[in-house]
Image (cartoon, grey):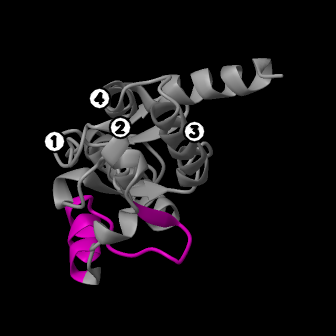
């Protein structure tokens, strides 16, 4: 005669199923919570040095201009035409189903002020958090624009730098500003 708490093969099998099911449930719950809290699917982003970077397949970047005189002498308003429909498409491509105001900025990987093109291949939903986020990249964009317009950096170099290593470009900016008189 077996008692109610005796470990029989059937009972052990049921315990294993219970623990596996519980583990799967907890993992699924964690994924749902992460998606709700972050509002993003991490598979659509890359990460380097604390920065959240765009998916290079979705956002390889696009260049409109490489001539410094044209970049520095032209307002970006003439080139800024991103529609709400395009912004929604960018969010969808990145798997962002919902977000709140200020959580993301639909940003140009190669900024318009650096000769970037207002097209979906240059757009991505850049998060504000974790920092450094879109506010810090905006500061970098302004600094790189000044570097192009003063002849310190070619437009092509600034564009390649921001596409391939904007965390490194940001560190260089911070270092340059710290050593400036």
Cα distance between the residues tagged 1 and 2: 28 Å
Frontmost of labels 1 and 2 is 2
Q: Is residue 152 left or right of residue 108?
A: right
Cα distance in 3D space between marks 4 and 3:
15 Å
Mark 3 against mark 2, which lies toward the viewer? 2
From the viewer's side, name the closer residue of 36 and 106. 106
**In the rendered image of this protein, does residue 49 appear above or below residue 32?**
above
Mark 1 or mark 4, which is nearer the start of the sequence?
1
Q: CA distance from mark 4 to mark 1?
A: 21 Å
Magenta highlight range:
85-106
Q: Which residue is mark 4?
A: 156
Mark 1 to mark 3 CA distance (whole Å): 27 Å
Pinpoint residue 145: horizontal percent, then vertical percent.
49, 41
- Is 82 magenta? The answer is no
Q: Which residue is mark 1?
A: 57
Q: In whole angstroms, how far apart are the C-alphas of marks 4 and 2?
A: 9 Å
- Label 3 and label 2: CA atoms lie apart by 14 Å
Residue name at image x 53 percent, y 66 percent: 103
Residue at figure coordinates x 40%, y 26% from the top left: 165
Closer to the chain start, of discs 3 and 2, is 2
């Amino acid at each position: 005669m077996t008692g109610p708490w005796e470990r029989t093969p059937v009972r052990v099998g049921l315990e294993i199923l219970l623990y596996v099911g519980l583990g799967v449930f907890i993992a699924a719950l964690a994924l749902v919570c992460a998606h709700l809290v972050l509002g993003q699917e991490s598979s659509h982003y890359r990460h380097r040095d604390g920065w959240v970077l765009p998916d290079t397949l979705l956002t390889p970047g696009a260049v409109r201009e490489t001539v410094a005189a044209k970049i520095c002498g032209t307002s970006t308003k003439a080139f800024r035409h991103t529609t709400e429909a395009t912004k929604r498409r960018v969010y969808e491509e990145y798997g962002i189903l919902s977000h709140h105001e200020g959580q993301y900025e639909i940003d140009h990987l190669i900024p318009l002020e650096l000769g970037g093109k207002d097209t979906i291949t240059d757009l991505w939903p850049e998060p504000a958090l974790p920092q450094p986020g879109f506010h810090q990249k905006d500061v970098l964009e302004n600094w790189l624009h000044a570097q192009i317009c003063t002849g310190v950096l070619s437009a092509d170099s600034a564009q390649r730098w921001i596409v391939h290593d904007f965390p490194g470009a940001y560190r260089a900016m911070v270092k340059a500003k710290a050593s400036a008189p």
